[in-house]
Image: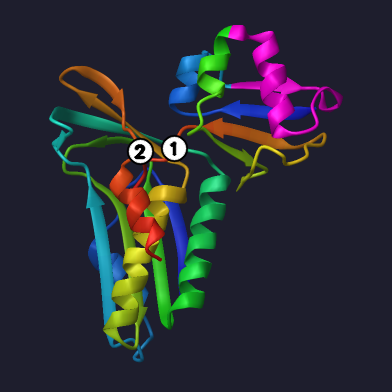
Amino acid sequence: MSFSIAVQTQDFDIGHEYAELVAGDTAAGAVVFFVGRVRDMNHARDVKSMSLEHYPGMTENILQNILDEANSRWELIAAHIVHRVGELQVGDQIVFVGVTSAHREHAFQAAEFLMDFLKTQAPFWKKELTTQGSVWVEENVKDVDASKRW
Amino acid sequence: MIRVLFLAQLREQLGAAELQVVAEDVVSIATLKQYLVAGHPHWEQFLSNSKLLVAVNHQYAKADVALKTGDEVAFFPPVTGG
């Protein structure tokens, strides 16, 4: 899987993802990956669990567009995005972005780009179950600003 | 027919997940919104939110995009994944 995406309810294993990213490849001198997790606190709210909704069909389109864009901007060998949906608990893994390249600057930048665009473009929505009831997560202005630098 | 979807918080605000609209009744995203509000006046405050996003056939779309029968239109709030 050089360039692939997955939207799934089940958890992912970092060791497995890493092995898949570099399988049969000796040109990739740099591997960067990012994992996003469910935090126990958000805007001073005590988060107990989270429900992640998405728009099937469009989600896959957008993630594929973002991967294609990253591949056109940097010299990448492989890239993989995994995003979970459904019910998640505090501490659970939400998202995995892994990128390989011959050199680290391409891998680092592409991974940041992928996360910035995933956060502002891909149709996922988080609803937190907190000690004060359930709350839809609001758009984060910092994420929007981060995506504008590319 | 045009399939219209309301996702995430918007679905809860409107109390509706999906409806069908006859294609001749609307020509663009903007007229579709007017059509929806005409039928459900209390939806106006939510559908007029300038942050609301729209997709036609799984791609982001602007208000002047022309609609045709068979299209799938989705309205949803800013995304919060990752």
Q: How many marks?
A: 2
Whether tag 2 and tag 1 are in contact, CB under 8 A, the answer is yes
Residue A43, quarter of the rendered image:
top left
Residue named by callout 1 = B78
Packing grade of label 1 (10 A; few <14, some 14-19, many >=20) is many
The front one of A15 and B59 is B59
Chain at numbered mark 2: A
Residue at 82% across, 28% down: B23
Please say whether residue B66 is one of the residues in the magenta stretch.
no
Assign the C terminus of chain A to one quadrant of the image.
Answer: bottom left
A37 horizontally vs A27: left or right = left
Q: Amino acid at mark 2?
A: Glu
Please say whether residue B32 is one of the residues in the magenta stretch.
yes
Residue at 44% across, 37% down: B78
Residue A81 visible to the viewer: yes
Q: Which mark is residue A80?
A: none
Residue named by callout 2 = A139
Looking at the rendering, the stretch of residues picked out in magenta corresponds to: B18-41
The front one of B64 and A125 is B64
* Residue sitting at the far bottom: A27
The front one of A123 and A50 is A123
Magenta span: predominant SS is helix
A128 horizontally vs A81: left or right = left
Q: Is residue A150 above or below residue B71?
A: below
Residue A1 visible to the viewer: no
* Residue sitting at the far right: B24
Q: Amino acid at mark 1?
A: Pro
Packing grade of label 2 (10 A; few <14, some 14-19, many >=20) is some
Q: Is residue A98 above or below residue B51?
A: below
